[in-house]
């Protein structure tokens, strides 16, 4: 329970991907909020589908849960069928947004340049960006993990000032660990986080790096969260599958009690 020794306040975020209707969203929060009512010293974020955002915002109104979009477009409005702007997310009550998730990169052709544009739009709108980076299995096996993380990091945040960068949360999500049940070991994740923190220090200074929260994502479950959070470099988790069920997500949020 040595929570005060953590250098940064942990963040546990749920990414619901293309899951949950509006009714299911309301049911989730009715079950989840009582389970985390006594949780302190941990920020909680949930990113539902666009259609359920308003329900999620209403359900979490008087709670510590922050609602996030899963994506956004970089333009404020225009002829971009199917897209959603930063202003639309803010108006709906979102306070954060995921950017550059590997599924966006892999299935929807999102490039580092698009990630950078989305990031600027989010920052200008006052949304807290959660910027996702991570290597594929082939890249890891080819010893290219650091090269990929460096390219994705600089591609996304390279043009920002330290002040612009400071609200950003980074999420290290090795693609080979997402939805596969194959988690990175805590040591391996911490090593990648340490590398990312070095990149932050080199680009924005040691003080900013020391304050930057880096979340781990990829098959995080109630059974492995404590081991991950025991690593000083790991400041939280971005949880997919295990965030869909109130009890398992609450167990992850309440990792100190496990
Ligand atoms: P899983 O937790 O289902 O592996 O998903 C991780 C993820 O992609 C979170 O953004």
Image (cartoon, helix red, strand yellow):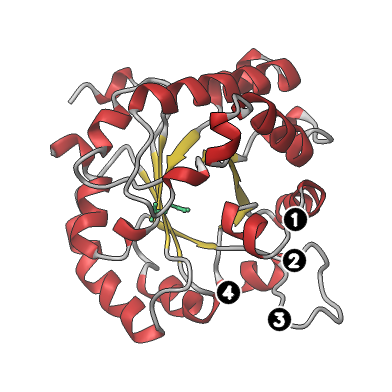
Q: Residue at x 82, y 49 (%)?
A: 113
Residue identified by numbered label 1: 118
Residue identified by numbered label 2: 73
Q: Which SS class for mark 1?
A: helix
- Looking at the rendered image, the disc whose residue lies closer to the viewer, 4 or 1, is 1
- Residue at the left extreme? 258
Q: Which SS class for mark 4?
A: helix
- Is mark 2 in CB contact (under 8 Å) with mark 1? yes
Disc 2 packing (10 Å; few <14; some 14–19; many ≥20): many
Name the N-terminal-most of marks 2 and 4: 2
Name the N-terminal-most of marks 4 and 1: 4
Name the N-terminal-most of marks 4 and 3: 3
Name the N-terminal-most of marks 1 and 3: 3
Residue identified by numbered label 3: 82
Q: Which SS class for mark 2?
A: loop
Q: Distance of mark 4 from mark 1, alpha carbons?
A: 18 Å
Residue identified by numbered label 4: 92
Q: Residue at x 47, y 73 (%)?
A: 18
């Amino acid at each position: 329970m040595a929570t005060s020794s953590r250098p940064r306040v942990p963040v546990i975020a749920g990414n619901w991907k293309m899951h949950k209707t509006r009714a299911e969203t309301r049911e989730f929060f009715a079950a989840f909020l009582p389970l985390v009512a006594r949780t302190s010293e941990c920020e909680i974020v949930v990113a539902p589908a666009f259609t359920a955002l308003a329900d999620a915002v209403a359900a979490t109104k008087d709670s510590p849960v922050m609602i996030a979009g899963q994506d956004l477009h970089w333009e404020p409005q225009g002829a971009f069928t199917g897209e959603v702007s930063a202003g639309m997310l803010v108006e709906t009550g979102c306070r954060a947004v995921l950017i550059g998730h590997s599924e966006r990169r892999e299935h929807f052709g999102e490039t580092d340049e698009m990630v950078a544009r989305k990031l600027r739009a989010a920052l200008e709108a006052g949304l807290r960006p959660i910027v996702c980076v991570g290597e594929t299995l082939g890249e890891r096996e080819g010893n290219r993990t650091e090269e990929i993380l460096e390219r994705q990091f600089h591609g996304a945040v390279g043009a920002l000032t330290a002040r612009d960068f400071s609200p950003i949360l980074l999420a290290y999500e090795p693609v080979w660990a997402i939805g596969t049940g194959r988690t990175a070991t805590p040591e391996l994740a911490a090593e990648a986080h340490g590398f990312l923190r070095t990149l932050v220090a080199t680009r924005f200074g040691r003080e900013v790096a020391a304050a930057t929260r880096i979340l781990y994502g990829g098959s995080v479950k109630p059974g492995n969260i404590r081991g991950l959070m025991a690593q000083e470099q790991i400041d939280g988790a971005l949880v997919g599958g295990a965030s869909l069920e109130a009890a398992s997500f609450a167990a992850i949020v309440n990792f100190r009690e496990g």
